[in-house]
Each structure stands twice: as structure tokens, then as C-alpha cells.
Amino acid sequence: MKVAVDAGPTTSGHSVRGVGLYARELISALEKNKSKYTDLQIYYKDFEKDDLSEYDLIHKTSFNPFYRNRGLEGINKIILTIHDLIPLIYPRQYPPGIKGKYRFNVNRRLIKKNVSLVVTDSETSKKDIIRFLDCDPSRIRVVYLAAGIGAWMINDREKLKKVAERYQLPSKFVFYLGDVNYNKNVPTLIKACSYAGLPLVIAGKQASLVYQGDPDLDSIRGPRDWARYIFGKPHPEHEHFESLKKMFIDEKVILLGYVSDTDLVSIFNLATLYVQPSFYEGFGLPVLQAMACGVPVIISKTNALVELCGDAAYRADPYDFKDFSGKIIKLISDSSERVKLIRKGLNRVKEYTWDRTAREMLDIYRSI
């Protein structure tokens, strides 16, 4: 059986985001494990550009509910990965507009008609897919992801020192990696760090763009709804970004912008804590990366993060910055708790490997 896997996110604008990391790590692990599946011929294609008609099965590795998703037309058997449905969960922050609503209804029909199996990252996302896409639960499979292959503890102090100097990092800091959209709840984290008296380091291109006053971001680039455009109504995320921009002025908020994978692992190792304050996540890759690097983790009490971490992370109320600051102060001041949480994190992250992800995916390909 000839299988085409969508490699498009590895070279598109998503390449440095979670969607790109997923495609990149999955493809690498598939290459490593596919020799045991001699009945499968795996090819990696850009679904937005390449002809897919010759393949028996295609695996689309990303999904946007409000846009055209090439590959869902039904000329092949289809596996579709849906990481999360955040735009549907927060419609006020991510309004679809007229075109988006139309495209969502088309996508929902195509999924019900043509997709053999939906793959998602967590039981939390599975429930959302059932709720919003009216998808039969028997046609949804949860396949957990893993930390990046290069995420590990670094003992080379000289290497870490050079990275700290290059990015002008303080000796102690809270680390956060990712976008700063509404669902990420970064304002609460900024308040918590300020209250706890600890600098916050943020890595990721989006935060730097917001601070520079140039939020040229997919979520707000151009009107999806012509009525909104005609009447001059700004995208709701603008208000959120403007508020964040003011908070980023704080000298204890350090914006690194895009960071290479190699430096990122060093920065994780240098961090005092990693905090994921999100209102909602479909999974939470940076949390696993932090655990793999021996960094204690604090998460918000949201379903997917709790599902992912178990008891290997402190939990805080995403609507209460003082709850987060209290957990931060606890882990700074109590070395025994810190060591205990690091140990739990290192054990927890062993449960998630890309080899396992690839083997489960290959078994799914074979079963279709």
C-alpha cells in the first residue's frame, strides 16, 4: 500500500510551531520504524502542491476548521490529524466570519463523508471533535505525542553559560515557550511572575511581533468576514495583543523571539521553572520538553494538561495569578519539593516517545 504523509507543515509558516514540530518528529520516527512494515510504502508530500491521486492512503497532518484543507476531497482513503479545535471553543476570540462558517460546514461534511479515521493528541481533543464535528467516536483514535528528540538534560556548564550570555538570561527565571494567543493566558503568567518577583523569559516569534507593533499573524491577517472589514471592526485578538504589548514593556519580561532547537534545549536547562498557564490546550509539547530537560513544571488546571502530566506537575487555577505565584514561590523556596517534581517529570516523560507514536501510526495505516 502506498501511503502519502503530509510534510507541508515542515516548510510552511507552521514549521517553527507545534504543528511543524509534530510533522517533523513524526516523519523522522516513521523513517526509523517503517522497515518493520514491509507492506507499506511511505512517501512525504506537500499536500498543498503535490498530486495525491496515485496513493492508496493519505495522512493529512494538520487541520484548520475555517480554511480549505486540501486532501479531504475523497480521491484516496484518508487519515486526518486534528490537534485541537481551539477556534471553535473560543468563537469570540477567533470569529470565523462568513467565509469561515461556510468552509467549516464544508469541512465537517467532508470529514463525515470521506475521512476513514481521525487521529488526535488527547482524550480532551477527542471529546471536542465528537462535540463540534459530530464525529463517530469509533472513528477517532488518540495517539500521544512526545518531547522533541533533542530534549534532554545538559551537564556541560560551559555550553549553558555561553547560551545564557548570548541571550542575556538572568540566573533565575520562569520560562514559557509558544504563541501568545488568547487561549495561552500569558497575561496571567506575567502577573504571577511579577508578584513572585521572578523574571519571565518568553521564546517564540509571535510575542516579539506583538511587542514590535507588527502583529502580522495568521489569526488576524486580513478580514475573513467582509462585514467586519466594511464597518471597520478590528479582529478581537487586536485588543488582546494591544494589552499584551503594554505588559511586555516590563523590564522583567524578556522576549527572545525565534530560538533554534539547539539553543532552546539549553534555555530549558537553564530555566528555574517552566509554566504553562493556558486556558486550553489540545496537548502541550513544551511541557514534555521541560520535563525531559529536568525542569519542574507548573500547569493550569485544564483537562489536556492534567491528562498529559498526571501528578508530575504543580497545578494552578488559570484565572488566579496568585495561585500561580504561590506555586512559583513554593518551588523556588522548597528544594525538596523541587527535586521531587523534577524526578516525577523525568519519569513521566519516559511514557511518551516518538517511536511509540510512529508504531501506533503505522499500525493505523495498515488497518485502514
Image: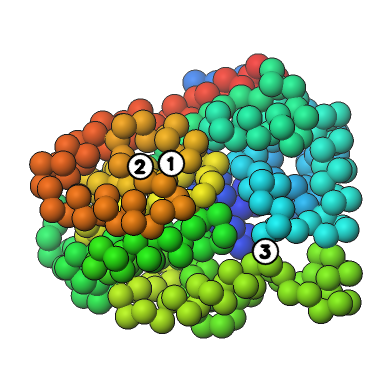
Image quarter for residue 43? top right
In the drawing, does residue 365 fall left or right of residue 95?
left
Q: Is residue 150 above or below residue 2?
A: below
Q: Residues within 10 Å of mark 3 (few under 14, many from 20)?
A: some
| Quadrant of the drawing holding the C terminus | top right
Secondary element at image label 1: loop
The kind of residue tagged 2 is Arg
The disc placed on residue 301 is 1
Which residue is rendered at x = 37% and y = 66% of the image? 191
* Residue 193, x across and y down, in percent: 31, 64
Give the mark nearest the N terminus, 3 or 1: 3
Instruction: Please give left or right for residue 166 compared with residue 56 in the image.
Output: left
Q: Secondary structure at mark 3?
A: loop
Please identify, in this view, whether the residue under mark 3 or under mark 1 is nearer the observer. 1
Residue flagged by tag 3: what amino acid is it?
Answer: Ser
- Are the residues flagged by discs 2 and 3 in contact, CB closer than 8 Å? no
Position above or below: 221 against 72: below
Looking at the picture, how far across and down is residue 125, in whole percent? 60, 35
Identify the disc placed on residue 219.
Answer: 3
Q: Residue at x 36, y 79 (%)?
A: 250
- Give how far apart the Cα atoms at labels 3 and 1 are: 25 Å
Query: What's under tag 1, amino acid-wise?
Result: Lys
Left or right, residue 21 beside residue 253: right
Q: Are marks 2 and 1 in contact (CB under 8 Å)?
A: yes
Of residues 302 and 289, the one drawn nearer to the viewer in this rendering: 302
Is residue 134 among the parts visible in the rendering? yes
Q: Give the residue number, with chain letter if any, for mark 2.
A: 315
From the top left corner, tell me how far across and down residue 154 is, in percent: 19, 52
